Image (tube, rainbow, N blue to C red):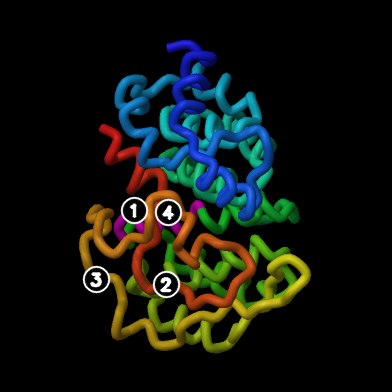
Amino acid sequence: MERDAVLQELEALGTERTKNTYLRNGAREPLFGVATGAMKPLAKKIKKDQALADELYATGNYDAMYFAGVISDMKTPEEFERWIEGAYFYMLSDYVVAVSLAEAPFAQELADKWIASGEELKMSAGWSCYCWLLGRWPDSEFDKNKLSGMLDQVEEHIHEAPDRTKVSMNSFISTIAISFEPLHEKAVETAAAVGPVEIRKGEKKAALCLLLKPSKKRWTGDKSDSNENMCDADHTACPLHLPGIVMGASLLKEPSLNDMDKTSFH
């Protein structure tokens, strides 16, 4: 399928209401306002097509960039580096690039590089990638000492981090508490030590709060069970995905393109 034909189909699926929601939360023109669920038939038709995904991502159209993530099949760090440079807000960095990276064998190495970059959306994508990885793979796939050190890093630096990075670091703490049993107690202690975190919503400040007693609601199910306790597919109504508002870190597994969109598209 050609790029222009895909753009035409996406445009036909857009609604003004969804477009306005995306614009309020950081997307910019051009975009059509396509709900991700509405993309499923088109994704099933195309399946995986990295060349087409690259063309769509390069358009700068938010809906096309998001859809590119659904059909992407990136194989090299260089491809991900190119995409993260084009990710201009968190729905692209954290829910397109980071989720796609979580499928790659070099995911942790590249996520580590982005976390150390000092750039807000790259750091956010790096922390987010770990959240997707932890929700997907068994505990045995991870180095406990490394993750413990990352919790220390969050505790030490979260209050001085850029706002979007704060949100992803916050999610990392709760994801460890939910999805990585060996460090559950340390994650709870880290949450208590961190306390409320201030982020901005426009000109206002708001507190990003972690729940301090996740043991009673800890994720205990199969990590492959991606359809239980999820928020809406477009991330438009769920407080976890709206930046700069008062919220508590969810103790339920967050949805992702990988769990929610890509798997349900096939």
Residue at point 65%, 51% (across, down): 26
Closer to the eye: label 1 or 2: 2
Mark 3 or mark 2, which has the lower sequence index? 3
Dot label at residue 250? 2
**Mark 3 neighbour density, 10 Å: few (under 14) some (14–19) many (20 or more):** few
Distance, label 4 to label 1, CA atoms, is 6 Å
| Camera-nearest residue between 145 and 232 | 232
Q: Which residue carries the number 1 mark?
A: 136
Residue 38 in percent (x, y) is at: 37, 36
Residues at discs 1 and 2 in contact (Cβ within 8 Å): no
Cβ–Cβ below 8 Å for labels 4 and 1?
yes
Amino acid, disc 4: Trp
Question: Could you tell me which secondary element the residue under label 2 belongs to?
Answer: loop
Q: Which residue is mark 4?
A: 132
Q: Earlier in the sequence, mark 1 or mark 3?
A: 1
Residue 44 in which image quadrant: top left
Please name the amino acid that badge 2 sits on: Ser
**Mark closer to the observer (4, 2):** 2
The disc placed on residue 152 is none
